Amino acid sequence: MSEDRACVDLRGPFAGTSGHLDAPYWQTPMPVIDRMLNLAEAGPGDTLIDLGCGDGRIVIAAAKRGARAIGVDIDAARIAEAEAAAREAGVADLTAFRCEDLFATRLEEASIVSLYLAGHVNRMLAPRLRAEPRPGARIIGYCFPMPDWPPEVSETFEHVALSLWRVPPRP
């Protein structure tokens, strides 16, 4: 079975459409976001892509550190909320938000990818996360592991697991 077909079978026929989310929306607490961005050493010169950005708080926090930051979410209401929050925070010039399926998001420009997705979604994304961002790019995750990819750093912070992976060199 092809990887694409396996993905469709696992996600279901309506996944990637409004109201059929691969990950539920829960706000990440600001202390956790700060720790995630510290682990990833986010700052000027970085391009962060947040897969499943919700209200944009990780994107906005990265932009406040000088990074260019892009948020992706399938929920148009969350994107509108995130855009308004970025304007209010004064970082709209460093942020962009896209209403799209995270499985369609191009990752080549990312030096950091942040995610708070369920384990099965991480498993489906892992091959792309290893291959698409440039070697050395950081993947920072909240709560859920990346099956078959041990993290470079793993810690518990505020009672949740945080993990940092680094995109390996190309053969």
Image (cartoon, rainbow, N blue to C red):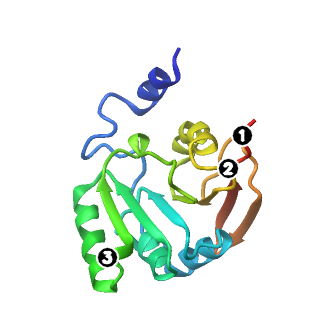
Q: Residue at x 51, y 64 (%)?
A: 47
Q: Residue 39 lies in what quarter of the image?
A: bottom right
Q: Nearer the viewer, residue 77 or 105?
A: 105
Labels 1 and 2 touching (C-beta < 8 A): yes
Up/down of 156 relative to 135, above or below: below
Decide if residue 65 is on the left or right side of residue 71.
right
Q: Amino acid at mark 1?
A: Arg
Label 1 vs 3, first from the N-terminus: 3
- Asked which secondary structure carries label 1, the reply is loop
Label 2 vs 3, first from the N-terminus: 3
- Asked which secondary structure carries label 2, the reply is loop
Q: Residue 140 lies in what quarter of the image?
A: bottom right
- Asked which secondary structure carries label 3, the reply is helix
Q: Residues within 10 Å of mark 1 (few under 14, many from 20)?
A: few
Q: Which residue is tagged 2?
A: 135
Mark identifier at residue 92: 3
Q: Residue at x 43, y 50 (%)?
A: 23
Q: Amino acid at mark 3?
A: Ala
Quadrant in the picture for the C terminus:
top right
Up/down of 96 relative to 38, above or below: above
